[in-house]
Amino acid sequence: YYFDAIKHYNYALRRKKTLQLLERVSDCHLKLKNYKEAERFFEEANKKFKLNASQKLKYAYLLKVNRRFKAAELILSSIEQSSSIDKK
């Protein structure tokens, strides 16, 4: 099921890259425990789009699973900074 979805999402991504497509293909890789690929798609999404807090949290989780602790820390601190700005 997820393998087929990945094929369809990759085809759609070749036509147009959207945050929704990048997140969905990443989620499919996450379900298959293919953490490196899941991280790769979230990394691309993070570079091209503004991620919300829950997306950043998922991205930080993938970084942590892939033992990229410093990068995960940076993402988590950006969530913390944006939430403190929202409170002002």
Image (cartoon, grey):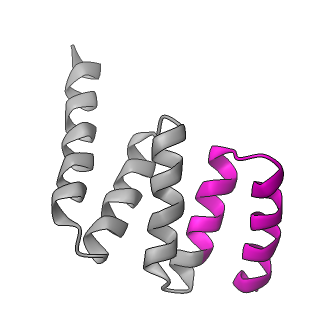
- Locate residue 22, reporting x and y percent: 62, 56
Above/below status of 45 relative to 87: below
Picture quadrant where residue 57 is located: bottom left
- Locate residue 39, reporting x and y percent: 44, 66
Above/below status of 69 relative to 46: below
Side of 50 relative to 73 (left or right): right
Q: Which of 77 and 47 is in front in this view?
A: 47
Picture quadrant where residue 27 is located: bottom right
Side of 25 relative to 76 (left or right): right
Picture quadrant where residue 71 is located: bottom left
Above/below status of 30 relative to 69: below
Magenta stretch: residue 20 in it?
yes
Q: What stretch is highlighted in magenta?
A: 1-28
Q: Which residue is drawn at 54% across and 39% down?
A: 48
Side of 5 relative to 61 (left or right): right
Q: Which residue is drawn at 24% across and 58% down?
A: 72
Q: Quadrant of the N terminus?
A: bottom right
Q: Which residue is drawn at 48% across and 64% down?
A: 40
Above/below status of 48 relative to 23: above
Q: In which quarter of the image is the C terminus?
A: top left
Magenta stretch: residue 9 in it?
yes
- Locate residue 80, reporting x and y percent: 20, 38
**Magenta stretch: helix, strand or loop mostly:** helix
Q: Which residue is drawn at 57% across and 66% down?
A: 26
